[in-house]
Image (cartoon, rainbow, N blue to C red):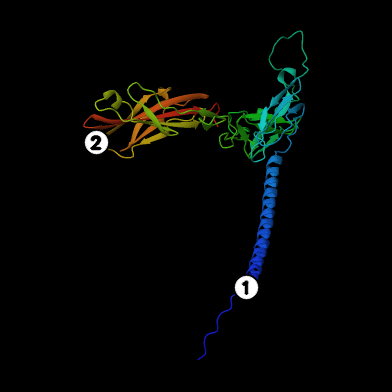
Amino acid sequence: DVSPRPQECPSTHNLVNSLRQVEKMLAVHEASYQQGLRSLRKKINALHNSTMAIFKTASCPKPEPPTHGRRLGRVFGIGHEVHFLCKPNYELIGPRTRVCLESLKWSGQQPMCRPSSSSSSFSSSSSSSSSSSSSPTPPASVRPSHCTHFLGSTRCTCDVGFTISGHIDECRLFPLGQPGRLCVHQCVNTPGSFHCFCPAGYDLARDGRSCTDIDECENRMHNCTLDQVCVNTYGGFQCVAVECPHLKNATYIKTSPMRCERNPCMLGDKGCTQAPNSISFHFLSVVSNMSAPRVLFRVSAARVLGDTLRFGLAGGRGRGHFSVQRSGRQTGTLLLVTPIKGPATLEAEVEMSELEHHSLLGRYLTKVTLFVSPYGF
């Protein structure tokens, strides 16, 4: 028989050498890991610095001062403002202040300075034999031209034997409020053409004639605090704070930014049970002189426990402009019944009552605030 050969045990010296080799290998891996980590941190810092540099240097193009005027403000970064002034005897047409938006474009449009009406120097011949203030009759050698406006151009013709003299004032030919008007808001005549301007809070549209509202809330151009809600309006914005009412017989708690719920009532407390179960707040923005009748808001019941739902106006400023009508089995509609000339702020309180055998089960109040613009666009 052959007996198994006994295994040889490594000496202590060999074990120490093996452990030292493993230790060296781990040290090399650790050094490599640390170096890679440092390199990664450098790249992250470089990327962060370059990104911050882009944000810091992001700015709107330098706005040119208007002819016969000057610009105030030397910082053109996002959120900064520049202001414009005109020289004496000139008046500013367009916005006095422009803000650099996040889109790296200036709000509004480039203003211009034109001679003010009080400083216009037109020589007029006076006659001692006539003190009439009426405009002088043009001589027989001058006749008015016949002009038409079509697709953005103006064409004028003269009677036989006459020719065009001087330049055309398109703004006078097509004043505001007339069919085919050139500008929605303000028209300024320029040599051989015209230019449209919009009021503060609006941008000139791509067609060069209409005005589009600037959403100050979305563009973060407002100054509302954290406990306020920014509501964009036509030509501006409103900062509103929704607060739950303090009633003698009932207490309320805010369950959402625009809703308050009544706390449970004590058994037999009729004063509390008569108070609204919930109060909702809504804010609407409309233009001036909007045609009526017009649907503004609808109130619906998610579920009906009783056998009857009633809708009506509970109060608010400007009740003569509003009416509530039933528009479905569980829906009531708030209507604007007469046009409102802005600027104005009106309120309507729409009440929905739920009854069971003529006994009140609950009242639900919706407060609608209407912000009416000064303009019809």
Q: Nearest to the eye among marks 1 and 2: give it.
A: 1
* Residue sticking out furthest to the top: 128
Foreground residue among 127 and 71: 71
Q: Quadrant of residue 33?
A: bottom right
| Residue 293 rendering spot, x and y as whole percentages | 42, 31
- In the image: residue 262, left or right of residue 206: left
Left or right, 70 with respect to 21, comes to right
Residue sitting at the far left = 357
- The residue tagged 1 is 11
- Dot 2 amino acid type: Asp
Q: Position of residue 113 (x, y in %)?
A: 73, 26
Mark 2 secondary-structure assignment: loop
Taking the image as drawn, is residue 341 in sight? Answer: no
Residue 196 on image: x %, y %: 66, 32
Which is nearer the N-term, disc 1 or disc 2? 1
How many discs appear? 2
Q: Is residue 62 left or right of residue 362?
A: right
Label 2 crowd bin: few (<14), some (14–19), many (20+), radius 10 Å: few
Q: According to the image, label 2 marks what residue? A: 307
Residue shown at the point (43%, 25%) measured from the top left: 347
- In this view of the protein, can residue 75 be seen by the observer? yes
Q: Quadrant of the C terminus?
A: top right
- Residue 101 vs residue 45, the one in the foreground: 45
Q: Position of residue 188 (x, y in %)?
A: 68, 29
Secondary structure type for disc 1: loop
329 lies above or below 7: above
Q: Amino acid at mark 1?
A: Ser
